[in-house]
Amino acid sequence: MKQATTRYFSTGFPVSWQTIDVVTADVACVNGKEDYRNLQINGIPANRPPERSGTWTTGEFSTTLEDVLSPITNAQFKRRRGDDKIAGRSAVVYDYTVAQATSHWTMVSPDDRRYNPAYNGAIWVDKETRRVLRIEQSTSSIPQDFPLNKAESVVEYAYAKIDQRTYLLPATSENIGCMRGSGTCSRNVIVFRDYRKFEAESIVTFDKGVEF
């Protein structure tokens, strides 16, 4: 699968996004973890994830959803009243919260400090297929001495065909993070495409059912 990430930054208010670059990579899901290969920045090969030139995020392909639904994370779900429509599909929406003690969402500051914040979000589940169509998450509390004070993420899913079979897969994602007290924010807009099989017959997909 190909992942293309357009990275932006903004300083001050109102927000005015300026393009930094476009990062492309081949992504595979191997043993429940995402493996990034063939990294390129504006078409030029890169030897490592490009944190130095802008924010680099991971997890959008499969591990974000897996982690939120994991019993270890112990997310607390509450169904919203009424239903919603997304991508033309009827969906049930659940709000959820994750405590800091069980959070695995890692924020990395420019000085390489790391923190796993408490967060909340929402998840849209297709009423007919019980598949996840969209997932949102947003930090709810971050220590005052941590350089970042806000992070948000959203992943949307769409159906794609691989070898004449249809799978529900990540289609787009957007991530925003802001520095404390400076008005400086970064934004990553991600598009997934060109899903395919590995030669070893393992599918580069995340097609896990969700039961509520």
Image (spheres, rainbow, N blue to C red):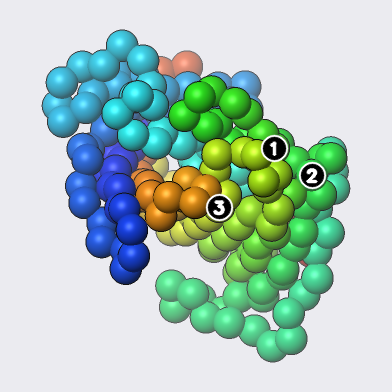
Residue at 49%, 40% (x, y): give it: 61
Q: Visible in this render: residue 173? A: no
Rendered location of residue 115, percent (x, y): 67, 34
Q: Earlier in the sequence, mark 2 or mark 1?
A: 2
**In the rendered image, the vertical position of residue 24 relative to residue 172, given as above or below:** above
Element type at mark 3: strand
Using the image as rendered, state which of residue 185 and residue 212 is in the foreground: 185
Using the image as rendered, state which of residue 124 and residue 165 is in the foreground: 124
Mark drawn on residue 100? 2
Classify mark 2: residues with Cα within 10 Å, few (<14), some (14-19) or many (20+).
some
Mark drawn on residue 150? 3
Contact check, label 2 and label 1, Cβ < 8 Å? yes
Q: Quadrant of the C terminus?
A: bottom right
The residue type indicated by label 2 comes to Gln
The residue type indicated by label 3 comes to Lys
**In the rendered image, the vertical position of residue 63 relative to residue 166, given as above or below:** above
The number of numbered discs placed on residues in the rendered structure image is 3
Rendered location of residue 140, percent (x, y): 69, 57
**In the rendered image, the vertical position of residue 211 relative to residue 180, given as above or below:** below
